[in-house]
Amino acid sequence: MGNFFNYIIAFASAIGGLLFGYEIGLIDQVLGMQNFAITFGIKHYNEAGLLVDTEQAKDIKGNVTFTFLLGCTVGAVIVSIMADILGRKRSILVGGFAFAVGGLLQALTGSIELFYFGRVVSGLGIGVLSMCVPLYISETAPTAVRGRMITVQQLMITIGILLAALVNLAIRNSQEQVNATEKQGSEPEWRIALGMQVVPGVILVFLMFFMPYSPRWLEDRNRHAEAVNALSKIRSADENSAAIQAEYKEIKEGVEFERSIGNATWSELLKPGIINRVLIGVTLQFFQQWTGINVILYYASDLFTAMGFPYETASKSLNIVNSFVNVVGTLPGMYLIERIGRRKLLIFGGLGMSLSHYLVCLFIGLSKTGNASLNLGALIFVYVFILCFSSTWGPVVWVYQSEIFPLRIRAKGTGIATFSNWSMNAVIAKVTPIIIDAISFKFYLIFGSTCLVMSLFCVSFVPETMGKSLEEMDELFGKVNVHEVESQKKN
Ligand code: BGC
């Protein structure tokens, strides 16, 4: 078990995950708000006095998603350099600040160009946070509970998504009352919904001021005394205690060892013993998006409606249950990650998700005539899918990428893997509507198959990292290991 302060560090920094979740959960709802749609040219009144989509509606909606994901992708690249130069803690501060500024811009502006700009700035913040928060937690957590502590970020992501769904529900309910008298909806509703993201952003920045620097980063910067001091604070133990001295020694030897074998250049990512980790990190993040999770989350209301549920139920209660299952499902993952390990979760999670997708497709296919039990079956297996994702691929991929790289290139390696996550997120956001238009509910088969492939990939290529200290990863993955280097030195 980690100590209490360690959990505070994990929860404080994981507010970055809350922002991530709130943002992805919210924007779709905001796009549907009438006053927002009118202000930014998505809807207008036609000659018959009806509120309809404008010609540019699709483009504007696409740009709103794209500008944010663009920011995230670029943020992932920036942080792979920034996290080494400024350190993990200050990078999280920068990410939180960018997110808050971007959110404020979106909430205050009336111009679509500035709105896009605000999206890019928020995205930059999320790109930075999504990579740096798990990295920071991994470098401050004790080995025995490192995986569990990193999963706190995923828990916060899912809470953020649920929060966004609840805020949206409250706003929609009040909007319905407003709309009874005022047709266009009201301006404050979308400005408040967007402005609310600033609050956790500011809380994150405030709390991070009080959090320690990563001892591993300090040691790498030759700030030895500060490294011991940070470690003793994090573990709530005396600097001179045997436990702190032993852990510090391991960190120090790890840093010295790494210096003896290579420079922290980008080309090092291509070396044997490292390239395999890059490929695993990038592939896991690629696959995480190809589980189809964001399609199910973004389009939940439409997907449930297509299963035959009334839009009102689909977009309100069924959608909330979806987000709720996502939160609850993270809990068994947090427990199991230090019990059965990362590898088994990834393998069985992939199989569970694959089966769920196939069954959803089967039930919808059989229920063409609108059979209520089959529709219910499809709905249940969407929830089973979410449960499988949130307890396995959701948390484990972020944990895995944060622990496999050696310190000297950890920021670069995790940055590239995070880039893979966000760029795939963008690709899927772009292609899914086209695929759904073309093959309708059969799109579940595509994700069912990718989930199967990802399980097989893990069986063949993903070693277990549970219980290994960050310093021991070289032995697990490496062609490069301590003994080899020692013998090379002797020759
Ligand atoms: C993924 C996100 C996803 C979220 C859902 C995260 O691990 O990276 O793309 O929206 O989980 O809970």
Image (spheres, rainbow, N blue to C red):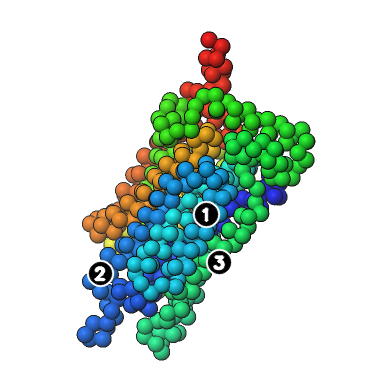
Q: Secondary structure at mark 1?
A: helix
Crowd tier of the residue under label 2, counting other residues whose Cα lies within 10 Å: few below 14, some 14–19, many 20 or above: few
Crowd tier of the residue under label 3, counting other residues whose Cα lies within 10 Å: few below 14, some 14–19, many 20 or above: few
Residue at 78% across, 40% down? 238
Which kind of residue does numbered mark 3 sit on? Val
Crowd tier of the residue under label 1, counting other residues whose Cα lies within 10 Å: few below 14, some 14–19, many 20 or above: many
- Check disc 3 and report the residue beneath it: 199
Residue at 40% across, 39% down? 283
Q: Secondary structure at mark 3?
A: helix
Distance CA(mark 2)–CA(mark 1): 34 Å
Looking at the image, is mark 2 or mark 3 earlier in the sequence?
2
Which kind of residue does numbered mark 1 sit on? Val
- Check disc 2 and report the residue beneath it: 56
- Check disc 1 and report the residue beneath it: 94
Distance CA(mark 1)–CA(mark 3): 15 Å
Q: In the rendered view, does 149 fall on the left or right side of 231? A: left
Q: Position of residue 265 (x, y in %)?
A: 45, 33
Which kind of residue does numbered mark 2 sit on? Gln
Q: Position of residue 57 (x, y in %)?
A: 28, 70
**In front: label 1 or label 3:** 1
Foreground of the two, 337 or 285: 285
Is residue 52 shown above or below 472? Answer: below
Q: Secondary structure at mark 2?
A: loop
